[in-house]
Amino acid sequence: MKQTHIQHFKKQLLSLEAELMECLGLTSESSKAVELDQARMGRVSRGDAMQQQAMVSAAHQRDEKHLVKVRKALKRIDDDDYGFCLECGEDITMKRLDVAPETELCLDCQSLLEQRQKRQP
């Protein structure tokens, strides 16, 4: 892979990292415990608040996992291992990296992984 392509993906990854870090900082306020004072908040409102809190928590966990993948990709760039499938060692296509610059697997290995995961209970 050309150095210009690597720099392009590094720029994308750094931007994505900053965006995720900002999102993670903003969602921490929304994940505070729901008040139990039903005089101030009715049952339906409290239930809605708890549901919203659960959704925020799930989004927070998803963003944390995504941030880890982005940082691993940046590390692979620093180690000159970026753009190679971690499973088979083949090049990951530019098209795939354009869609998800943090990807670790080529399309074939990703498909095999998903098939194995479907078979597991």
Image (tube, helix red, strand yellow):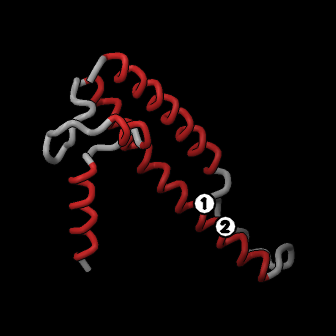
Amino acid type, callout 1? Val
Image side of residue 9 versus residue 15, left or right: left
Image quarter (top left, top right, bottom left or bottom right) of the N terminus: top left
The answer to whether 53 is drawn above or below residue 3 in the figure is: below
Question: How many numbered marks does the figure carry?
Answer: 2
Amino acid type, callout 2? Gln
Is mark 1 in CB contact (under 8 Å) with mark 2? yes
Task: Write the residue at 22% across / 53% down.
Answer: 108
- Say which of 53 and 116 sits in front: 116
The answer to whether 49 is drawn above or below residue 62 in the figure is: below
Kindly give the residue lying farthest to the left in the view shown: 88
Image side of residue 99 versus residue 78, left or right: right
Disc 2, SS: helix
- Crowd band around label 2 with a 10 angstrom C-alpha radius: few (<14), some (14–19), many (20+): some
Residue 97 % position (x, y):
37, 38
Image side of residue 92 versus residue 53, left or right: left
Residue 94 % position (x, y):
34, 34
Task: Write the residue at 21% across / 68% down.
Answer: 116
The residue identified by callout 2 is 52
Image side of residue 57 versus residue 109, left or right: right
Residue 121 % position (x, y):
26, 80
Task: Write the residue at 21% across / 53% down.
Answer: 109
The residue identified by callout 1 is 56
Disc 1, SS: helix
Kindly give the residue lying farthest to the right in the view shown: 40
